[in-house]
Amino acid sequence: MDAEEERRGFQKGDLEMCRRFAGYLREHLPLLAVAIAAMVGAGAAQVAGPWLIKQGIDQYILPGRFEELWKIAGLFAGALAAAFVCQYVQTAAIGQVGQNVCFKLRDQLYAHLQKLPLRFFDTQPVGRTVTRLTNDIEALSELVSSGVVAILSDVVILAGIVCVMMWMNLKIALMAFLFLPALVFITAIFRARVRESFRTIRLKLARLNAFLNERVQGMRVLRAFNAESETADRHAAVNADHYEAHMDSIRLFAVYNPVVDMISTLSTAVLIAFAARGILAGQMTFGELVAFLAYLEMFYKPIRDLAEKYNILQAAFAAMEKVFGLLDEPAEPAPRLARPVTRFAGRVKFDQVTFAYSKGIDVLERVSFEVGPGERVAIVGATGAGKSTLASLLMGFYRPGAGTVTLDGVPVTDYDPPALRRRVGYIAQEPFMFSGTLAENVTLGDPEVSEDRVRRALTTCGLTASDRVLASRMAERGATCSVGERQLIALARCLVFQPDLLLFDEATAAIDPMTESRLQRAFREVSAGRTTLVIAHRPMTVRACDRILVLHRGRLVESGDHEELLRRGGVYAALFRLEEAAA
Ligand SMILES: Nc1ncnc2c1ncn2[C@@H]1O[C@H](COP(=O)(O)OP(=O)(O)OP(=O)(O)O)[C@@H](O)[C@H]1O
Ligand SMILES: [Mg+2]
């Protein structure tokens, strides 16, 4: 999270956001109405309590009519029961509305993520996107369940108390509220300070999270380079910042809470002083005094809780902005024609393709080549030459800035993306494994792929296909597999779907000769009879191909077979000699 992103107060866009959020609440109007009715009921029942006590004292206890006291006791019990039922209904109903809104927003966000262009994921930290789906949405649910209704409920109770007190005894009530303006003034100052403090806390917390996230992920490197003590120092600094921010707010509350208590006590003292005279002068009853004392106690409690509710509101506004911001990220444009795909012959053509990830820095420059059906073509080039980028363009992950990438004569971006990707077998340079069984990783959860097909694919790729292997569990990101194994599994993943075109981005990691030969055999099997584009990092793979394309700093500089290119003595010859020397 950026500092910039966090530094905000309520702004004019907030109204717009609230309106949008209200749209989600509108779907649950009946439930919301039930919650609000229950809230008013609970408020009324709570406010009725002290008034009933007053009646009991003035009408039955002081005159000594104890035998009739049960009438008031019954009413009091009734009020208690009503408050209980109403509070139950209110909490359950509003909680349900909050969770429903949460559920819908989460589903919407996840569905939207699936439609966002990959460019988005290149630039956004994973942690931030996940925070949107979890914490931020949680903050919105909190707003519904504890924010809006609790504040409304407080307002109802406060207004109820003021009205009942004034109705019971206007003069004494005014005396009791003598210090109210001072309280409003102090609260306003406090609110401004605490807003700043809460904001700083959130900022420091985000920094702490980001720091921990990165260090835990990079633990292996930290250990390898003995950087523990350096990161411990950095951690201590971030931690101290976080501590200071919290202490600041603790100090604020340490002042505010006693001030509210003091005002409440002063009010009580003033009330008792005036009430004593009032009672003596017959302007006030003893029951009224007891009721007033209870009301004053009730009155100051929500004021003390104010800061917490303010925090919920603040967090919710910040979360709302981020959640809606993510929902408003433009989705990948839908293909114009969305051509149906049955089978591809496998004719690939790059025509004057230029591409840049960020404006002005061309990663590919006017690349043109053609691959015929059934041909096996290797793409080679130095690190950063743009090879993987080429594959991404063919998969339709990105759109070329200029020129066209066609498959069977149609621009790849005109095909329905899922249909295109189903017929093109793509093995990424760093194959990704999901947590689950190996079999699930091969089928990616597609129920149409039979177990038999999975076994055949694994065997073709030189892996054992026993029940134990199929059911073996993979760790997150395939952390428990070697890079070579991951590539073999990825090859099998491609094979079960019988693609028309194979796009293989070979891993750069060094692989032992045994795995190398297993991978080579698997590659030959899988690529037999299919148009194959392989981004090759190993001489053995290159030799298995009919033609070689050489990419150098985003340009296609050479093309031909191994012998031809060696004879030319250009970029390929230089690359090859280096590899031979290294081998
Ligand atoms: N998602 C991205 N966002 C921005 N720049 C990128 C991105 N991916 C790659 N690049 C840049 O584009 C250039 C080409 O990258 P590419 O991954 O295509 O290289 P490569 O030829 O596959 O290299 P290698 O052999 O190391 O895999 C590099 O300079 C890289 O820094
Ligand atoms: Mg690459």
Image: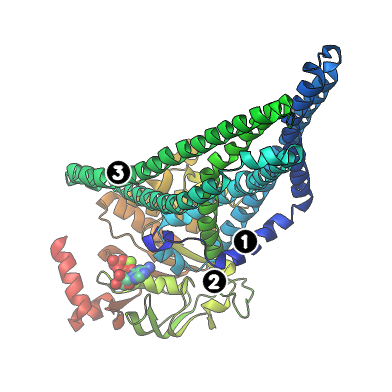
Q: Nearer the viewer, residue 208 or 422?
A: 208
Whether disc 1's CB lies below 8 Å from ligand 1 is answered no
Q: Is residue 151 left or right of residue 170?
A: left
Specify the quadrant of the image occupied by residue 65.
Answer: top right
Q: Position of residue 488 (x, y in %)?
A: 40, 53
Badge 3: residue crowd in 10 Å (few <14, some 14–19, many ≥20): some
CA gap, disc 1 to disc 2? 21 Å
The residue under the point 56% across, 31% down is 269
The residue under the point 60% across, 30% down is 273
Q: Of callouts 1 and 2, which one flags the residue occurring earlier in the amino acid sequence?
A: 1
Are circles 1 and 3 on residues that touch, CB within 8 Å? Answer: no
Q: Of callouts 2 and 3, which one flags the residue occurring earlier in the amino acid sequence?
A: 3
Type of amino acid under label 1 = Cys
Type of amino acid under label 2 = Pro
Which of discs 2 and 3 lies nearer the camera? The answer is: 3
Type of amino acid under label 3 = Asn
Indicate whether 433 appears above or below 111.
above
Q: Quadrant of the N terminus?
A: bottom left
CA gap, disc 2 to disc 3? 37 Å
Are circles 2 and 3 on residues that touch, CB within 8 Å? Answer: no
Which of discs 1 and 3 lies nearer the camera? The answer is: 1
Count up the numbered dots. Answer: 3
Q: Label 3: which residue? A: 239
Q: Quadrant of the C terminus?
A: bottom left
Which of discs 1 and 2 lies nearer the camera? The answer is: 1
Q: Position of residue 343 (x, y in %)?
A: 59, 71
Whether disc 2's CB lies below 8 Å from ligand 1 is answered no
Residue 18 bears which disc, if any? 1
Q: Is residue 481 left or right of residue 501?
A: left
